[in-house]
Amino acid sequence: MLTREQLAERLDYSHASVASVEQGRFRRMGRNSAGMPKRTRSTLVVVLLIWSLFAFPWFDKGCDIAEAYTAVIKYGVPEGLEPLPACYG
């Protein structure tokens, strides 16, 4: 019969206590288990999409991509034929 230490070594759960390995209360650290929560990830995706929608008019008026995303933060959405300070310095 295996000792607690041997069982923990064989299962290679260095982050779990020996007692939790024995009782089956462990979760192997996989690729997605240690990442950010799904709600946070979804929120970041939505924010990025909205930011991209606001940056497109700047890009369409002649700014490069980096200037367009920065212009959204500095100036908001361009209105009509206003001067484009974001694209010219």
Image: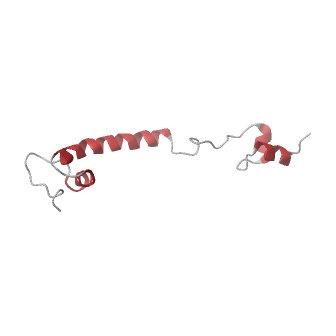
The residue drawn where x is 15% and y is 60% is 88
The residue drawn where x is 14% and y is 58% is 85
**Does 55 appear above or below 89?**
above
Q: Quadrant of the C terminus?
A: bottom left
Residue 20 in the figure: left or right of residue 39: right
Residue 33 in the figure: left or right of residue 83: right
Where in the figure is residue 5, as x and y percent of width and height?
84, 48
The residue drawn where x is 29% and y is 41% is 50
Where in the figure is residue 49, as x and y percent of width and height?
32, 40
- Quadrant of the rendered image containing residue 1: top right
Question: In the current view of this chain or complex, which residue is farthest to the bottom?
Answer: 89
Task: Decide which of 76, 68 is in the foreground and name it.
Answer: 68
Where in the figure is residue 66, as x and y percent of width and height?
27, 54
Question: In the current view of this chain or complex, which residue is farthest to the left?
Answer: 81
Question: In the current view of this chain or complex, which residue is farthest to the right?
Answer: 1
Residue 55 in the figure: left or right of residue 14: left
Where in the figure is residue 77, as x and y percent of width and height?
18, 47
